[in-house]
Each structure stands twice: as structure tokens, then as C-alpha cells.
Amino acid sequence: MAAGKAEAGALLGKGHLAMTIDQGADTSRYQGLVALDGGTLEDAAHEYFLRSEQIPTRVRLAVAEELRAGNGGARHHWRAGGIMLQFLPKSPERARVADLHPGDAPEGMELAAAPEDDAWVQGRALLETVEDVELIDPDVSSERLVYRLFHEPGVRVFKTAPVLAECSCSRENVEAMLKSFSQEDRDHMVEDGRISVTCEFCSANYVFAPADVGAKAD
């Protein structure tokens, strides 16, 4: 480890990564938990798809500082980029993955291995050629990068969908949730003359006066 630098796993530390999947109002939101044990975010994502989705998946992520010349001097900001490859053949048998280790198998026992499909092996090998600079270069579009990697088997581009940092929580929803509790529970939530609720997904904080939700002040 170079002086003054830390490995990604050391920066993340120990704990769990919660991955929440929300596909819209007509579907149920579900969440998967992945242990952080010193690996990278790529490692955590691979572990999630292996144990939760069980879909052959590879993820590449990159982040770096960017300096660009501007009228007022060099402009400094961070850029991040990523690409995810999944194997979703029409025949589900082709995407079969090896069984997870049961944890209590006798020592020396060989577990059954599922052969990998040639198309998946090829796609994974191509993805592993991606360099960090390709993921964060503002002059390399997503379409150009995908075509650069997979032009031989063929590429089809769909309409883009914007990526937004947002959460479905709102003050109105939190207030309705608080009012659904019993009178006793609401009274116990009051601290220092107020009720404070922090969203576990986006860390937004909502503060209510006890009277707003029918609770009694201290």
C-alpha cells in the first residue's frame, strides 16, 4: 500500500451493503443484504447477484478526480462510471450457475460444477478488458464503449433512462406512518419536544412537532 493511500476495502470497512430494487408502483420493492468483508464494491455486487439473483453477472466500476481547463482556471470534480454485464439467454438452462457451498459438506468432497456457457465466457472476457479510463472518460459515450466491446456479436441500443438520486419517501408519507402507531408509541417517540425520523434509504431527516402527529409533548 502506497503512503497516504488506502485500499477500497479498507475505506468501506466492515458491515453490510443494502441493495434495494424498486421497479415501480405496480411491483413490490425488495432488498438484499451483502456483507462487506474487506472487498470492493464490485466484489459486493458480484456476491449479491450470486446469492440473491443467481444471474451470471459481472460489474466494473471506476472513480477518479478530473481536472479540466476553464475560464477561471482548472475545474476540479469527481467522475464515476460503471458497466454491468448479465447473461440472460432465452433458455434458462444456459444460465445455470454452480450451487452455493452448503457450508457443512465433508472435507474433501467435490461439489457439482455447472459448465459455463461459451457465450457468457466470451462476454465476461471482453468486459474484463475495460480500463478505468474508459469508464470515466467524458468523451467516450456509453454507446461507443458498448460497441467497442461487443460489435462482433452485435449491439442493440434501447432508449436511455435517466439516473436520478431520489427516494420515494416524503414528509406526507412519514407523517402518515407516524399516525398509524398507537398513542403510547407516538408519545414515546417525543424527544426534546419533537419527533425526528431519518429515512434509512436516503438519510433525509424529517422533524415533527408532537401535535403534528397527535403525540403528547414531554
Image: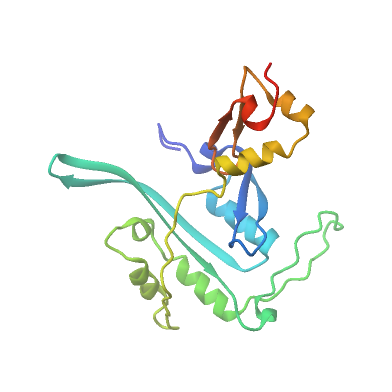
Q: Nearer the viewer, residue 88 or 109?
A: 88
Residue 14 image position (x, y, % from top left): 62, 38
Q: Quadrant of residue 159?
A: bottom left
Q: Quadrant of residue 200?
A: top right
Residue 163 image position (x, y, % from top left): 44, 57
* Quarter the C terminus occupies: top right
The type of colouring in the image is rainbow
Which residue reaches farthest left?
71
Q: Residue at x 66, y 32 (%)?
A: 213
Q: Nearer the viewer, residue 120 or 198?
A: 198
Tell me if 88 is positioned left or right of 67 in this view.
right
Residue 196 to residue 145: above or below: above
Q: Quadrant of residue 71?
A: top left
Tell me if 191 is positioned left or right of 59 in this view.
right
Residue 152 image position (x, y, % from top left): 41, 83
Q: Residue at x 38, y 56 (%)?
A: 132
Q: Residue at x 62, y 18 (%)?
A: 193
Number of labels in the image equals: 0
Q: Residue at x 69, y 74 (%)?
A: 96
Residue 124 image position (x, y, % from top left): 52, 70
Q: Nearer the viewer, residue 195 or 47?
A: 195
Residue 51 to residue 157: above or below: above
